[in-house]
Amino acid sequence: MAKLVPCKACQKEIAKGVKKCPSCGKDQRNWFMRHKIMTTFGIILLIGIFSSLGGGNEEQEQAATGADVEAEVAEVTEEKIYKVGESVTVDNVEVTVTVSEEMDTIGDPNLFGKKASDGGTLVAIQYTIKNISDEPIGMFSYPTVSLVDEKETKYSSDIDASGAYAVETEIDNSKVLSDLNPDISVTDTAVYEVSKEKFAQGKWYIQIGEAKIQLK
């Protein structure tokens, strides 16, 4: 036997699920069932609105994420440039360029000195190396010290000029055959011969490992 429920209008008992009351003719269906097309349209409209809002949030999140990534990349790729007198740490040593000077002649060229070649100039530096590790290190573990221009061209030191500069300044106490013990510092020199015209233009750096120290 079908379950009986009261009519929504006349309250007479009618079978559950009938569309209209047999007594008063009142439609027993709810609003959504009576207007299926409008209900369907409304659902589709709501889905579209929520999808649009969700897409906007996603785009904002993606934009924010992209900005964060760009900031991180900029931070990573931004190169720190040091000044003469500032210390840089490379592996197990701390290096400090203390003096930078441009010279035409070092010492007496007739003896053991060095005169710049025609069109050239001698760029001399003095720098200290300190062992900041807990173990002695040999000179072959020292980082390479190079002169670098704006185009990233690396210039090796002039051995003769560097030797003459060490003798003239009387400050070179670098270790050749002995290891550098922990917490000990030594002073070294290097001289680079480059084009005088080029050195007068642009920026020049001393590169130690990946660190750069600006000379001019």
Image (cartoon, rainbow, N blue to C red):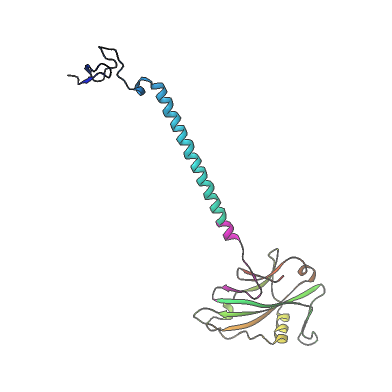
Residue furthest right as drawn: 118
Instruction: Name the side, left or right, on which 70 lies relative to 50.
Output: right
Residue sitting farthest toward the front: 10
Magenta stretch encompasses residue 69 = no
Q: Quadrant of the N terminus?
A: top left
Total labels drawn: 0
The extreme left residue here reads: 1
What residue is rendered at 45% in x and 29% in y? 45
Instruction: Give the magenta range.
Output: 72-92
Q: Position of residue 54 (x, y in %)?
A: 47, 39
- Classify residue 76 as left or right of residue 191: left
Residue 204 position (above or below residue 187): above
Where is residue 112, by image quadrant? bottom right
Nearest to the observer: residue 126 or residue 111? 126
Q: Residue at x 57, y 80 (%)?
A: 130
Residue 148 position by quadrant: bottom right
Q: Residue at x 61, y 66 (%)?
A: 80
Residue 32, given in percent of the width and then of the height, sits at: 36, 24
